[in-house]
Image (cartoon, helix red, strand yellow):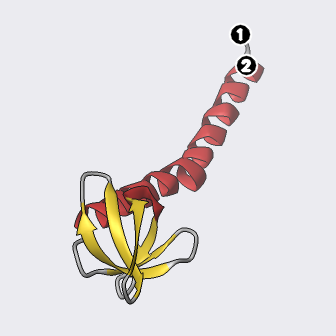
Amino acid sequence: MGAEGVGTFVYIGIFFAILYFLMIRPQQKQQKKRKEMLEDIKVNDAIVTIGGMHGRITKMRDNQITLRIADKVEVDFDKSAIGYVLGKE
């Protein structure tokens, strides 16, 4: 293997380092932030689902929440359907 082969490996290494810092690492940070947000939600938090439904949490079970979207109207959602908590963006 000559200098050309070593140079190729260096370029490939640089490419993967750039790929890691521009794509993989930010995605891991975002996933960690989302996981923390889902663990920190509690009853009475105002949330928005990923579909855009606004409401307030009235009940929580393992992976399910009950969301009050209007007076006397409650809907069940999976926790994974939560887009963000209002006031904590």
Amino acid on which the number 1 mark rests in the picture = Met
The reply to whether the C-beta atoms of the residues labelled 1 and 2 are less than 8 Å apart is yes
Secondary element type, mark 2: helix
Tell me residue 76's x, y (percent).
Answer: 40, 64
Q: Callout 1: few (<14), some (14-19), or many (20+) C-alpha neighbours within 10 Å? A: few
Residue 68 in the image: above or below residue 31: below
Quadrant holding the C terminus: bottom left
Q: Nearer the viewer, residue 49 or 61?
A: 61
Q: Nearer the viewer, residue 9 or 67?
A: 67
Residue 85 in the image: above or below residue 64: below
How many marks can you see?
2
Tell me residue 27's x, y (percent).
Answer: 51, 54
Quadrant holding the N terminus: top right
Amino acid on which the number 2 mark rests in the picture = Gly
Q: At x 50% / y 57%, what residue is drawn?
A: 26
User: Mark 1 = which residue?
Assistant: 1
Q: Determine if residue 61 is in view.
A: yes
Residue 5 tag number: 2
In the orientation shown, which residue stands out farthest toward the front? Answer: 72
Tell me residue 58's x, y (percent).
Answer: 27, 75
Residue 10 tag number: none
Instruction: Name the side, left or right, on which 89 lies relative to 3.
Output: left
Tell me residue 6's x, y (percent).
Answer: 67, 22
Q: Nearer the viewer, residue 30 or 41?
A: 41
In the orientation shown, which residue stands out farthest toward the right? Answer: 4
Secondary element type, mark 1: loop
Q: CA distance from mark 1 to mark 2?
A: 6 Å
